[in-house]
Image (spheres, rainbow, N blue to C red):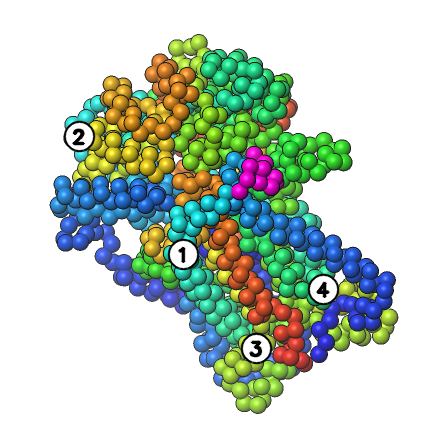
C-alpha cells in the first residue's frame, strides 16, 4: 500500500507544510517590534476576572515597554498538554500541579529558569518543603511555587450532628475516624468515610495516608530510587480501609471515585468524611453548590511516629521549553509580577481577593505559606475584608495545620506509581478476599521496574 | 476523536456482490481519468489528515521522545516494553470480553428496533428521532444519569427497581463481575441510534415485490423477516458486524468516563491502556509505547478483517 | 409504488394481527420515549432545578421549587448567542466536506470502478484500525505545520478523512441497480452527469445518514476543536461549555447544556424531513 508515489506525495506535502511554517523557531515578534510573551489565562473566567487580568497585563507592559503580553487560554489537561507540548504551542508561561513538577523538569519539558529565579529578591525565602516540588536535582528552582496546600480531612457537619457526633470535635486519630465513620453509616445511612480511587487519585490518597501513618513510598539516594510500597505503614493503611469497608461497612457503596465525583457526592451530603486538598472548599461551593453550613475540615490524624507527616500539593508556574533567554527573563518577570505579587504585595493581594470575591470565587480557603508563616498571616489580614468562606468551621484545620510536618510528594515517576496503586485500593474496597500485602508486593516490583528505567 | 461517527466504525470492501452483478467487466473507456478526478478530494483529505499522521505514528513507535527535543530511534524497544507490561494481557482479555458482550447485547438491539420501526405507519419520523436522541445527549449528562442509575447503594435507580422484586442491591460498576456488562448496556444505549438509522435507510431499499412474492407462497410474518428482510439487509449487516468488531476492539469512552478501568483493572481496555501510556501516566507521557501498542492493535484488526472478508465471501457466494 | 414493510395491507386488516401490532408499537413507543426522550427531559428538568436538588434527588420533580434564573445565567454567562454561530459554521463546513469526500469517492469506487478500487478501499478501511486517540499528536503537528491553528479548516478538513462515511456510501451505491447507470451511460451521460443527475438523487437515504452523523459528530466534538481553535472568538459551544465547568454551578452548566442540545435536536428533525422519510426514495429507485 505504501507505493513510492504515495510516499513522494506525502513527502512533498510535508515539505510544503514545513515551508509555510518555516519561520517558527525564533522569538515571536509582538506588536510594535516588542518581544511577544504569551501567558496562560484560565478559560471560562467571568468578565470581571478577565478585565482584572487584562489590567494586570497593561500594568506589566507599562513597566516593561519592550514586552507585548498576549494572554492565551490554557487549562492543565493531560491530553491537550501533550499535543501542545509537541506542537510548541503552549503559552510561554503556564501553570502545572505540584505532582507533575519534577517530571516536567526531569524530562526537560520546561525551560531552566533557575538563573532568573535566583535573581528574585525573595529567592531564598521559599518555604523549603514547598519549593522542593519545583526544584531540579541540583536544587535550582525551575518551577516556581505559586500556591500550596496540605491534605486535610473534610467532613460533613450536618451528618456529624445527625449521627450524634460533635461537629466541633472532629476525629483526631484514625481509630476515631473509624468509629465516627461507623456511627455515621449506622445512623444516617450515608457513607461514613469515602476515598478516591480512580484516575491516579487512588495512589495520591494512599500515599497521603501512608505519610500520615509514618511511611514513605520511595527512597531516593543519589541517582537510584527504591520503591517502598509494601511497608508496614502502607499495610496498616489498607488494613484500616479493609476494616472500615468489610467489618464496619461504613464506606458506602461507591468505590470508583475520582476528584470530581467524590466532591460531587460530598456536596450532595452522601459522604461523612474524605481526604483531599485543604483548599477544596472553593470548588465544592462553586461547582456543586455545597451548603456552607455542611462544611467542616480538620487536620489529617497523624500516627505517633517521627516520620508521620502531611502530603502537600499546590501549583507551579513554569516557562515553556526551548524559550529564548529573552523570553525566559520576561517570563520570570511575569511570574513575579502576576503570580507572586499576590502573595507578597498588599495592593496585589487585595485587588486579587476583591476580584475573586466579586466573581463569586472563594476567598480565604485554607492554604499553606509559599514563603514563611509571618508573610502568610500578614496576607490573611490584608484580604480579611473579602473572605467569603465559613472561617469558623475551618478552625479545626487552620488552628493546627502549622503543627503538622509537610512532606513533599514522591519525586520519581510520581503519576505512574500512583497509577499502580489505584488498582490496589480498588481491589481492597471491592473484593472481600483481596490480599493487600500480595497486591502491594506486586505493585512495588512494578514500580521498581519503572524507577530502574530512568 | 475528530470525526468519530456515532456508531462503531469500519466497513468492508467487497464482502457482498452488488445486488445486480455488472454485465460487462472493464467497459466504459475514459472513465479512468474521471475516476481519478472523483477520487481527488478523498486522496487529498485522507493523504494529509489520515495517511500521513498514520505514517508518523509508525515512525514514532520506533522512537523515544519527550516531545520537545529531537526524538531518538530506539528500534523495537517500545514494542518490547509494551509486550512486557503485565497489564497488556489484562487489557486484551477485557477488550475481548467487552467485544463479546457487545456482540450479544449490542448487535441485535438496533436491528430489532429498526425492523419494528419500519412497520410503523404513522409518525415514523417521531420513532426514529426518539431512537436517535441518546446519541445527542451530551456525555456529561449521560455520565451523571447513568452513574445514578448504577449507584451501588439501595437508592440507585436500578437497585430501587430490583428492590420492588425483592432482589438485593447489585454493585454494578463497583464490582469486577458486573462492571463490564454495565458498560456494555450503557454503550448500547449511547450508540444504538446511529445504527438504527443506517438500518432504516437500508430497509427503504427492500423491494416490496419480494414480500408480495413471499406472501403468494403463504409465508408467515416470521418467514418474511427471515427470508426477505434479513437477506436483503445482508450487505449492511455484514458491514455493521465488522464495524462493531473494529469499534469494540477500540472501546475507550465508556471505561474512561465511568470506571477509569476499575475496579482493579477489570475494565481496563486496550485503548484505555494506550491513552494512559500517552497521556495519563506521566506527562508528555510514553508516546512511543502508545504508538507501538496502537500499531499492534491495528495489525490484529487488519488480519481479523481480512479473515472476516475471506470467510464471508465464500459464505455469500454459496 | 407502495410504501410497505414486512406486513402487507392484508395483514394489517386482520384483527388479530392488528392488536399485536398495536401492542408491539405501543411498547416500542413507550420504550423509546423512556430511553430516548427520558434523558433529554431529565436534562430539561435539571436545567431549572437547583444544584443541590439535582445531586441529592436526581429523579425528584422540583422538591424545592424551580430555578428559572439558571437559563438566563447560562445564556449570558456562556454567551450562547455568540458561540452559536461558530457552532453552526463548524458543523456546516464539516458536513459539506464530509459529503463531498464521501459522495465523490463512493461514486468513483462503486460506480466508475477503476481497477485499483480494491487497493484504495483497503487503504481507506485501514485507517479505521489505527485508534484515533494516538493520532492526536501527529495530526496536531500536521495542523500546526500547515498554520491552520485558529482556522475553521483545521476542523473541516480532518473531518472529511472519515473512512466510515466513504465505506458506507460505497456500500450503499453498490446496492443500487447497475442497469440504471448503464442505461444513462448508453444515453450518453458522462461521469459528471451520471453523478449529479442519476446517483445523487438516488442517494438520498444515505446522504441523510451521513449528514446526521456529520452534523451531530461536529456538534459533540470537543477535544479536537479545543486543540486547534485556542482563540475563544472562533470556538464552538462544545468547547466553551467544558471550559466554564470549573467556574459555574452544576445547575447553570446543565442549563447551558440543555439550551445547546436544542440545536442538534432541531437539526436532526430537519434532516429527518429532508432525507430519511421512507417515501422520499420511492420514485428514484423504481427499477
Work out whether residue A110 or residue B297 is closer to the camera in this orientation and state it. Answer: A110
- From this view, report whether residue B63 is shown above or below residue B115: above
Category of crowding for the residue at label 4, using alpha-carbon neighbours closer than 10 angstroms: few (below 14), some (14–19), many (at least 20): some
For the residues labelled 1 and 4, the Cα–Cα distance comes to 38 Å
Asked whether disc 1 touches disc 3, contact meaning CB atoms under 8 Å apart, the reply is no
Q: Position of residue C112 (x, y in %)?
A: 54, 78
What residue sits right under mark 4 in the picture?
Answer: B120
Quadrant in which the N terminus of chain C is drawn:
bottom right
Spatial CA span between label 1 and label 3: 36 Å
Q: Residue at x 49, y 17 (%)?
A: A167
Question: Mark 2 sits on what residue?
Answer: A120
Q: CA distance from mark 4 to mark 2?
A: 76 Å
Label 2 and label 3 in one chain: no
- The image quadrant where one finds the C terminus of chain C is bottom right
Distance, label 4 to label 3, CA atoms, is 25 Å
Q: Residue at x 51, y 29 (%)?
A: A266
Badge 3: chain ID = C
Q: Position of residue C251 (x, y in %)?
A: 49, 42
Pointers 2 and 1 in contact (C-beta within 8 Å): no
Please give the range of residues in magenta.
C56-66
> In which quarter of the view is residue A403 placed?
top left
- Where is mark 1, residue-wise? C81
Q: Are marks 2 and 3 in contact (CB under 8 Å)?
A: no
The crowding category of the residue bearing disc 2, from other C-alpha atoms within 10 Å (few below 14, some 14 to 19, many at least 20), is few
The residue furthest front is: C65
Amino acid at each position: 500500500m505504501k507505493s513510492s508515489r504515495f510516499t513522494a506525495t506525502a513527502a512533498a506535502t510535508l515539505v510544503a507544510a514545513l515551508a509555510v511554517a518555516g519561520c517558527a523557531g525564533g522569538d515571536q515578534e509582538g506588536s510594535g517590534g516588542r518581544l511577544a510573551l504569551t501567558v496562560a489565562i484560565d478559560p471560562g473566567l467571568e468578565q470581571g476576572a478577565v478585565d482584572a487580568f487584562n489590567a494586570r497585563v497593561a500594568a506589566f507592559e507599562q513597566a516593561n515597554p519592550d514586552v507585548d503580553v498576549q494572554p492565551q487560554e490554557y487549562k492543565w489537561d493531560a491530553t491537550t498538554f501533550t499535543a501542545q507540548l509537541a506542537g510548541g504551542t503552549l503559552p510561554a508561561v503556564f501553570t502545572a500541579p505540584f505532582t507533575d513538577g519534577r517530571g516536567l523538569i526531569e524530562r526537560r519539558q520546561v525551560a531552566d529558569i533557575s538563573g532568573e529565579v535566583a535573581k528574585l529578591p525573595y529567592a531564598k525565602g521559599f518555604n523549603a518543603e514547598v519549593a522542593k516540588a519545583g526544584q531540579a536535582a541540583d536544587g535550582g528552582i525551575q518551577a516556581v511555587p505559586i500556591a500550596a496546600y496540605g491534605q486535610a480531612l473534610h467532613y460533613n457537619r450536618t451528618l456529624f450532628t445527625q449521627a450524634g457526633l460533635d461537629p466541633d470535635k472532629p476525629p483526631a486519630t484514625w481509630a476515631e475516624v473509624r468509629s465516627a465513620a461507623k456511627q455515621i453509616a449506622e445512623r444516617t445511612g450515608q457513607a461514613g468515610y469515602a476515598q478516591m480511587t480512580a484516575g491516579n487519585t487512588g495512589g495520591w490518597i494512599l500515599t497521603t495516608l501512608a505519610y500520615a501513618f509514618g511511611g514513605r513510598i520511595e527512597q531516593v539516594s543519589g541517582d537510584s530510587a527504591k520503591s517502598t510500597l509494601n511497608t508496614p505503614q502502607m499495610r496498616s493503611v489498607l488494613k484500616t480501609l479493609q476494616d472500615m469497608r468489610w467489618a464496619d461497612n461504613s464506606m458506602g457503596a461507591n468505590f470508583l471515585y475520582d476528584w470530581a465525583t467524590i466532591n460531587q457526592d460530598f456536596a450532595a451530603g452522601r459522604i461523612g468524611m474524605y481526604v483531599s486538598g485543604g483548599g477544596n472548599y472553593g470548588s465544592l461551593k462553586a461547582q456543586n453548590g455545597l451548603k456552607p453550613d455542611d462544611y467542616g475540615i480538620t487536620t489529617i490524624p497523624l500516627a505517633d511516629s517521627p516520620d508521620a507527616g502531611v502530603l502537600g500539593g499546590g501549583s507551579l508556574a513554569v516557562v515553556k521549553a526551548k524559550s529564548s533567554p529573552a523570553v525566559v527573563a520576561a517570563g520570570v518577570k511575569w511570574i513575579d509580577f502576576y503570580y507572586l505579587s499576590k502573595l507578597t504585595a498588599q495592593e496585589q493581594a487585595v485587588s486579587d481577593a476583591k476580584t475573586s470575591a466579586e466573581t463569586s470565587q472563594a476567598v480565604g480557603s485554607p492554604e499553606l505559606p509559599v514563603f514563611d508563616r509571618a508573610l502568610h498571616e500578614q496576607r490573611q489580614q490584608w484580604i480579611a475584608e473579602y473572605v467569603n468562606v465559613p472561617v469558623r468551621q475551618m478552625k479545626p484545620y487552620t488552628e493546627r495545620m502549622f503543627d503538622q510536618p509537610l512532606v513533599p510528594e514522591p519525586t520519581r515517576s510520581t503519576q505512574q506509581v500512583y497509577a499502580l496503586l489505584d488498582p490496589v485500593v480498588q481491589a481492597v474496597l471491592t473484593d472481600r478476599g483481596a490480599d493487600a500485602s500480595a497486591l502491594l508486593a506486586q505493585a512495588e516490583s512494578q514500580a521498581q521496574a519503572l524507577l530502574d528505567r530512568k | 476523536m475528530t470525526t468519530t461517527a456515532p456508531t462503531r466504525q469500519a466497513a468492508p470492501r467487497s464482502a457482498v456482490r452488488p445486488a445486480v452483478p455488472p454485465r460487462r467487466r472493464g467497459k466504459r473507456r475514459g472513465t479512468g481519468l474521471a475516476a481519478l478526478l472523483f477520487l481527488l478530494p478523498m486522496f487529498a483529505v485522507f493523504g494529509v489528515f489520515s495517511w500521513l499522521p498514520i505514517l508518523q505514528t509508525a515512525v514514532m513507535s520506533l522512537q523515544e521522545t519527550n516531545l520537545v527535543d529531537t526524538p531518538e530511534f530506539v528500534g523495537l524497544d517500545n514494542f518490547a516494553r509494551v509486550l512486557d507490561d503485565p497489564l497488556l494481557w489484562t487489557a486484551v482479555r477485557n477488550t475481548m470480553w467487552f467485544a463479546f458482550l457487545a456482540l450479544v447485547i449490542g448487535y441485535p438491539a438496533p436491528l430489532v428496533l429498526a425492523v419494528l420501526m419500519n412497520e410503523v405507519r404513522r409518525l415514523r419520523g417521531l420513532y426514529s428521532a426518539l431512537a436517535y436522541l441518546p446519541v445527542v445527549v451530551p456525555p456529561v449528562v449521560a455520565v451523571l444519569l447513568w452513574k445514578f442509575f448504577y449507584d451501588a447503594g439501595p437508592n440507585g435507580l436500578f437497585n430501587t427497581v430490583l428492590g420492588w422484586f425483592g432482589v438485593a442491591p447489585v454493585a454494578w460498576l463497583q464490582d469486577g463481575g458486573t462492571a463490564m456488562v454495565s458498560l456494555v448496556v450503557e454503550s448500547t444505549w449511547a450508540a444504538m441510534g446511529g445504527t438504527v438509522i443506517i438500518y432504516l435507510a437500508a430497509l427503504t431499499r427492500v423491494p416490496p415485490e419480494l414480500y408480495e412474492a413471499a406472501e403468494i407462497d403463504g409465508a408467515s410474518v416470521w418467514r418474511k423477516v427471515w427470508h426477505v428482510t434479513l437477506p436483503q439487509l445482508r450487505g449492511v449487516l455484514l458491514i455493521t458486524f465488522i464495524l462493531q468488531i473494529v469499534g469494540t476492539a477500540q472501546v475507550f469512552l465508556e471505561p474512561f468516563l465511568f470506571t477509569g478501568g476499575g475496579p482493579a483493572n477489570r475494565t481496563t481496555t486496550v485503548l484505555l491502556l494506550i491513552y494512559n501510556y500517552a497521556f495519563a501516566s506521566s506527562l508528555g507521557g510514553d508516546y512511543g509505547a502508545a504508538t507501538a501498542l496502537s500499531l499492534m492493535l491495528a495489525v490484529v484488526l487488519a488480519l481479523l478483517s481480512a479473515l472476516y472478508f475471506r470467510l464471508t465471501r465464500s459464505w455469500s457466494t454459496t | 409504488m407502495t410504501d410497505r414493510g414486512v406486513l402487507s395491507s392484508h395483514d394489517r386488516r386482520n384483527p388479530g394481527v392488528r392488536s399485536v401490532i398495536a401492542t408491539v408499537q405501543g411498547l416500542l413507543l413507550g420504550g423509546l420515549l423512556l430511553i430516548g426522550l427520558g434523558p433529554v427531559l431529565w436534562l430539561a428538568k435539571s436545567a431549572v432545578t437547583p444544584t443541590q436538588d439535582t445531586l441529592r434527588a436526581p429523579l425528584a420533580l422540583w422538591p424545592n421549587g424551580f430555578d428559572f434564573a439558571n437559563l438566563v445565567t447560562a445564556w449570558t454567562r456562556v454567551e450562547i448567542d455568540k458561540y452559536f454561530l461558530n457552532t453552526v459554521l463548524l458543523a456546516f463546513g464539516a458536513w459539506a466536506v464530509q459529503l463531498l469526500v464521501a459522495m465523490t469517492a463512493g461514486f468513483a469506487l462503486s460506480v466508475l470502478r477503476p481497477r485499483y478500487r480494491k487497493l484504495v478501499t483497503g487503504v481507506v478501511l485501514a485507517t479505521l484500525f489505527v485508534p484515533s486517540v494516538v493520532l492526536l499528536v501527529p495530526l496536531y503537528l500536521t495542523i500546526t505545520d500547515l498554520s491552520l491553528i485558529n482556522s475553521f479548516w483545521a476542523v473541516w478538513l480532518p473531518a472529511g478523512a472519515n473512512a466510515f462515511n466513504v465505506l458506507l456510501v460505497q456500500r450503499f451505491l453498490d446496492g443500487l441497480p447497475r442497469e440504471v447507470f448503464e442505461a444513462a451511460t448508453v444515453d450518453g451521460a458522462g461521469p459528471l452527469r451520471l453523478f449529479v443527475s442519476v446517483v445523487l438523487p438516488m442517494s438520498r437515504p444515505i446522504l441523510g445518514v451521513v449528514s446526521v452523523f456529520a452534523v451531530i459528530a461536529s456538534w459533540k466534538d470537543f477535544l479536537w476543536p479545543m486543540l486547534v481553535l485556542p482563540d475563544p472568538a472562533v470556538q464552538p459551544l462544545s468547547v466553551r461549555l467544558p471550559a466554564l465547568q470549573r467556574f459555574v454551578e452544576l445547575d447553570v452548566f446543565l442549563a447551558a447544556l440543555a439550551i445547546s442540545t436544542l440545536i442538534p435536536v432541531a437539526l436532526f428533525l430537519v434532516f429527518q424531513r429532508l432525507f430519511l422519510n421512507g417515501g422520499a426514495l420511492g420514485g428514484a429507485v423504481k427499477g
